[in-house]
Amino acid sequence: MEPSKEQQNTPEKSTSEAPATVSSAFPPSGCCTNCGGPTISEPPPLASFPEMSPPPNYRPIRAPAINLPHNSQAIIFSPVPHAEQVPVVSPPYQFQSPVKRIHSPDDIRRFHESASCKNFLGFVVSLSESIRGYKISDPCDISPTVAAIVSILETLLQWIDEIPPAQQSARYGNVSFRSWHERLGERGESLILEFLPEEFKESIIEIVPYFFDSFGNSSRIDYGTGHETNFAAWLYCLARMGIVKEEDYHGLVARVFVKYLELMRKLQMVYCLEPAGSHGVWGLDDYHFLPFIFGSSQLIDHKYMKPKSIHNDDILENFSSEYMYLSCIAFVKKVKKGLFAEHSPLLDDISGVPNWKKVNSGLLKMYRVEVLEKVPIMQHFLFGWLIKWEE
């Protein structure tokens, strides 16, 4: 006897489940639908539920437990970067207008084999180590140079209040950001000249482009880790000239970089900057990378707070002002809706790492692979006399 049309459309069951399901849900053909006794009439058609969709014929696959980027092997097997002392330049100075040099994977390979790349990455590691175990509010040496840079960033913050966002329907890219960036181009050079020593005034031709590229792109109205790297490169250039010294590193992170992060978040929120080169849900963050490195270093060997503590809202509320990593997590939770594990799976997985030292070393390796080895990001990076391109 052929099955009815409705029975043909029902999903297949295993042989062990089929008889029980049919007998309990629907009486067999030729039986009364009320008492199950024999009858000569045909049973009524099986009930259909038009509002219900049939179960899918596939099993949805969730992302792996560790949501590493596609080139996770490169991250896992790469060595942990180490701190390096920045070599200070000596006369005669040969400052020059920096230019772009990276256009292909071969150029990336050449850059990573150079002393310039290794020393710049070593500078980032040194900054990370300088803040290890310290809260943001802990006292630190603030040199005149550090104070001057903080003052410049505060001036840039004031400009946002003076240049309100334009009324527009577009979700991203408020055109008033171009006015803010235009003012930066007009006045930024003079702001830097105020704290440069006389012997380094001529360096303005080389270091200003890094500074201007630290706050996003005015034509695309976007911001990403490449712009953040330019700010680190600007600080590195100051270190190369000896204007910033090793004893300033703690202040550079706890005062300068924290103020820079405050500025960039305000720019992102007020002018709706589009994420530049974001990996979306599979990235660490839409805009930043370095504060996660510095913030994880702050928490190394902390008595109570572990990587999994990011899921405790009370901890985020009470300590995000003291620890950059917690501040970043709190900001992500503020601007993104839904479950944290869904909109930030990589950060969620990092919270399962047993200690902050492993988090910090892993992020340093990831920064090298995911930022400094990416052509779409590094094709905009500039090379001059302070950061040399080695043929």
Image (cartoon, rainbow, N blue to C red):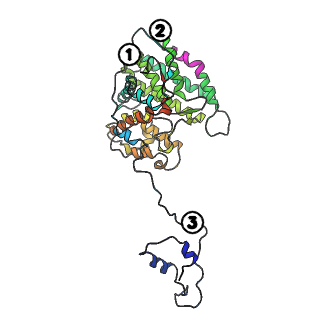
Give left or right: position of 296 versus 32: left
Q: Are marks 3 and 1 in contact (CB under 8 Å)?
A: no
Please name the residue shown 45% across and 32% down the image. Answer: 105
Q: Residues within 10 Å of mark 2 (few under 14, many from 20)?
A: few
Ranked by sequence position, the earlier of labels 3 and 2 is 3
Does residue 140 appear in the picture of this structure?
no
**Dominant SS in magenta:** helix
Please name the residue shown 49% across and 78% down the image. Answer: 22
213 vs 359: above or below = above
**Residue 198 position in % (x across, y down):** 47, 9
Give left or right: position of 169 versus 342: right
Ranked by sequence position, the earlier of labels 2 and 1 is 1
Please name the residue shown 55% across and 29% down the image. Answer: 216
| SS category of the residue bearing label 1 | loop
Give the magenta-colored segment's residue range: 184-194
Q: Residues within 10 Å of mark 1 (few under 14, many from 20)?
A: some
Q: Are marks 3 and 2 in contact (CB under 8 Å)?
A: no
Task: Estimate the spatial distance between the alpha carbons at disc 2 and disc 1, rounded to whole Å.
Answer: 17 Å
Task: Estimate the spatial distance between the alpha carbons at disc 3 and disc 1, rounded to whole Å.
Answer: 69 Å
Kind of residue indicated by mark 3: Ser
Q: Are marks 2 and 1 in contact (CB under 8 Å)?
A: no
Query: Which residue position is annotated with label 2?
Result: 198
Kind of residue indicated by mark 2: Glu
Residue 53, numbered label: 3
Query: Which residue position is annotated with label 1?
Result: 88
In this view, the residue in front, 380 or 244, is: 380
Quadrant the C terminus occupies: top left
In this view, the residue in front, 182 or 375, is: 375
